[in-house]
Image (cartoon, grey):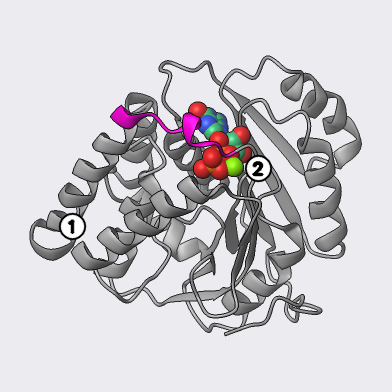
Amino acid sequence: MKSLARGGTIPNEGAGVFIVLPVLNEIANIGNLLDKIEAELAGVPFTVGILDDGSTDGTIEYVRERMPGSGRRLHLICRKKTMRASQRGSALRVLMLWGLENTSHEIFVEMDGDLSHRPEELLTGIGLIREGRCDVAIASKYVEGSRVINRPWGRRMVSKVCSYAVRTLISPAVRDYSNGYRFYTRAAARLAAEHAYRYGSPIYLSEVLALWMRHGLRIEEFQSLYVGRNEGLSKLRVADLVKAAIAVFEIASRYHVLGFRRLPAAVEGAREQSSAAGGK
Ligand SMILES: Nc1nc2c(ncn2[C@@H]2O[C@H](COP(=O)(O)OP(=O)(O)O)[C@@H](O)[C@H]2O)c(=O)[nH]1
Ligand SMILES: [Mg+2]
């Protein structure tokens, strides 16, 4: 396991890094986050793909203003939310497909836009992939040495119980199934794009992880510091939790028995799915 310290300089830059950033009303964080990403990745070719689902707090305007000075390193996709529940999963999917089709970056990174995931850990995760240590690296909340701060007790409990349930149902090999700060190879992105997905909600994260595990990809979790942001239990709707619980059983059945459905025409089909599965 890596320590919380930065990963240091990156050997063999290759074709760079594609950052997948779903955002909704992140005006308080987005500028700071993009500054930090740029600082951490100085010297590394990278593109940040941002998908906004209809922010009303100026996030879209801010990103648009920043784009001309970004040296084409920012790409913004704007959608309108079609439901109250989070559509972060389908946002991740759309961005991943965009990165596959429009960049040649070899490493994909998914992270939140609210600074809960620290850009200071980018080089650690990127380093693990570049060194060929794994196909998917997760900045885990639940490995030895990891820490979670500023997260209310109730929210921590929900997260822990969910992780425990998913580990029991899918596999104990991974500790942090719902983690949204993860790094993976372009080949892993392609594999995900070649398969259908069902969930446009955040449970998409576990769905894709299970797909990768079923296909034998090597997953590694590394120590991380997670900084909670505005995470009261009130944000979680009971209906969404129930849906997520049912989804976990469904994902486990595909992981253990049924397998994951391959799309007939890889990326094309996956793109259609993305627009169809706005969120479940
Ligand atoms: N595009 C998009 N991003 C979202 C949506 N919901 C949340 N996000 C973003 O996804 C990330 C994680 O969401 P957050 O609400 O912080 O979830 P939490 O950390 O699990 O409480 C943040 O960057 C949000 O701005 C959504 O419906 N669409
Ligand atoms: Mg958050």
Badge 1 density bin: few <14, some 14–19, many ≥20, Cα 10 Å: many
- Residue 67 vs residue 145, the one in the foreground: 145
Q: Residue 75: say if magenta.
A: no
Question: What residue is shown at x 70% (from left), y 31% (from top)?
Answer: 26
Is residue 277 positioned above or below 54 on the image?
below
Q: Quadrant of residue 236?
A: top left
Q: Secondary structure at mark 1?
A: helix
The answer to whether 94 appears left or right of 165 in the picture is right
Rounded to the nearest angstrom, the CA distance separating label 2 from label 1 is 30 Å
| Residue 263 appears in the figure | no
| Marks 2 and 1 close (CB-CB < 8 Å) | no
x%, y% of residue 79?
54, 20
Is residue 103 positioned above or below 131 on the image?
above
Give residue 252's mark: 1
x%, y% of residue 147?
61, 67
Q: Which residue is mark 2?
A: 229
x%, y% of residue 100?
52, 49
Badge 2 density bin: few <14, some 14–19, many ≥20, Cα 10 Å: few
- Residue 85 vs residue 153, the one in the foreground: 153
Region rendered in magenta: 231-239
Question: What residue is shown at x 9% (from left), y 56% (from top)?
Answer: 258
Q: How many marks?
A: 2
Which residue reaches farthest right? 69
In the image, what residue type sits under mark 2? Answer: Arg
| Residue 223 appears in the figure | yes
x%, y% of residue 264?
22, 44
Q: Quadrant of residue 22?
A: top right
